[in-house]
Amino acid sequence: MQDNAFAEVSSLKAGSQILKMSHISKRYQGVQALDKVELDVRSGEIHALLGGNGAGKSTLLKILSGLTNPDEGTIFFHGQRVAIESPRSAQELGISMIHQELSIIPDLSVLENIFLGQERLITQRKSWSPWVNRREMAEKVRSVATEFGITEEELWRPAGEFGALKKRSIEIVKALVVRPKILILDEPTSGLEEHEKELLFGHMRSLQRLGVALIWVTHHLDEVFGLADTATIMRDGKSVAQTSIEGINLNDLISLMFGSQAAALIEQPKIDRTAGKAGSKERFKTLEVVGFKREGVLKDISFDLWDGEILGIAGLAGAGRTELMRALMGIDKLDSGSINVFGKIGKIGHPEKAYELGIAMVPEDRKVLGILSEFSIEKSISISKLVNVLKKGFLSAKKEKDLASEFISKFSIKTPNSREKIRNLSGGNQQKVIISRCLNTNPRILIFDEPTQGIDIASKVEVHKLIRELAAAGKSVIVIASELNELIRLSDRIIILREGSIVGELESVPERIQINGYEVVEQDILYKSSRVKV
């Protein structure tokens, strides 16, 4: 990628300090979000920023990207003290950020998405003009886009037509248009398949070779080794260590991130388990899906679900996993098909009907489908079933607060109080609130679509424990997870989708692992989902 846009970046001396954040502190409503945090970044390095949910990573990066201001501390860029007062001032310094939640506008073309908000790069002429020349835009970005797998023809197509990896590539190219010297990547592998992750890592190495410093936030600690050069570890709003990746192992990282909790996290859960009534002769069918069809998406899908069972749905991106669950919840309309829920046969034409039947869903996309950003935790939980917080026909503030407090305590949700807006919580804590909202309806069937996406290892352990406890209590659970390790170790049975059809089913997954080994089970799923022998 030898574009003129990167001439200045490429000339940076490799390994020289480009950023120093010193004694950065920030308080929100009496809560110390950051306490004298230190961050040193060098040009041309991949610098992992690690920590559990609520450790302060997001707040630190908001300060660096100009979204908020610190209460105390100093920032040095190329040795010069700077004040980053807005996202525009961060961009002018050469700092770009790719957020975990993609900001792609699906109806705009790829080219329009790349330059959205950055049209000034094209309109910098002697006389100002409100018009932009799309051909000029395409010419400016062509070589960089090609490097990241975006063809000339794809630049003109609506961005909504593409999958997660291509959308992530669009975000990277958008960030590169402003000639960054520092690129912040917040959970860039969220929603990507394994082969897509490898392609993304290749892109990151290409940027590193150009001298761009990458600050990389990830909860997938295994990804750090072999890719990152350095890691800064945060815990409870403090930077507790900065270390070379070569001199540390996974257990050391976990210990630094979680302190006294680390021992429980390092000890992996046993595979041999009994989920609910999965092995009982008294099992009964809770759900029967018959002939779900939706043109171009779902092709005659039928399956059963039993009480106390964790049913995994496997498949590559585009296989129809999320689309199947959306149809089950009545979000998307079907061309044909029926459903039997606890003996009630019919169709679910609206999510309200699904909830009435005892079905609840934790959606994949927290930002779009999961949270109402201006709602408090109290309202975010109670809204799913307001009758639970009524008193004499009116909403009871006390009941609403008590309900939220119960879930905050049960799931250890980190928040100043129950009135805090959900948008101010970390991703892991937002996920716990969404799960609480679902449980408020007292569902008998729960659907978890990517339940641990973007949350730390401690929160993952808690969510996995919760899913197993729900099954043990007789609930029926459906899980979709891109991480095969997670899906295999959670599920009793796995249905495999490919191109909108069921192409395989694995019964008694825990027993299969014990008899044949984990790798055999994993390869079987990969082969059926891709028809490629592994």
Image (cartoon, rainbow, N blue to C red):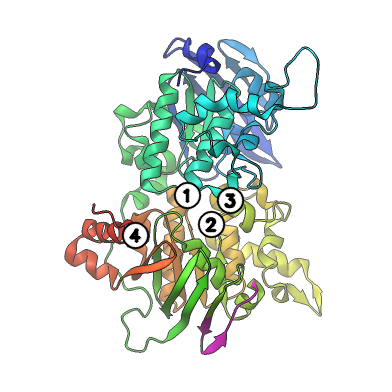
Labelled pair 3, 2 in contact (Cβ < 8 Å)? no
Secondary structure under the numbered disc 3 in the rendered image: loop
Residue drawn at x 53%, y 42% is: 167
- Could you give the CA–CA distance between mark 1 and mark 3, rounded to whole angstroms? 25 Å
Residue 51 location (% of width, % of height): 47, 39
Q: Please give the label number shown on residue 364.
A: 2
Numbered label attached to residue 124: none
Q: Where is residue 219 in the image (x, y as percent from the top left)?
A: 44, 43
Q: Which of marks 1 and 4 is nearer the N terminus?
A: 1
Q: Which residue is drawn at 72% across and 67% down?
A: 400
CA gap, disc 1 and disc 4: 17 Å
Residue occupying image coordinates x 40% and y 49%:
193
Residue 31 at x, y percent in the picture: 65, 41
Cα–Cα gap, marks 4 and 3: 38 Å
Give SS at disc 1.
Answer: loop
The total number of labels drawn is 4
Task: State the extent of the magenta-drawn residues as a range.
Answer: 338-350
Residue at which label 4 appears: 529
Q: What secondary structure is found at the residue carrying circle 2? A: loop
Q: Position of residue 112 (x, y in %)?
A: 65, 36
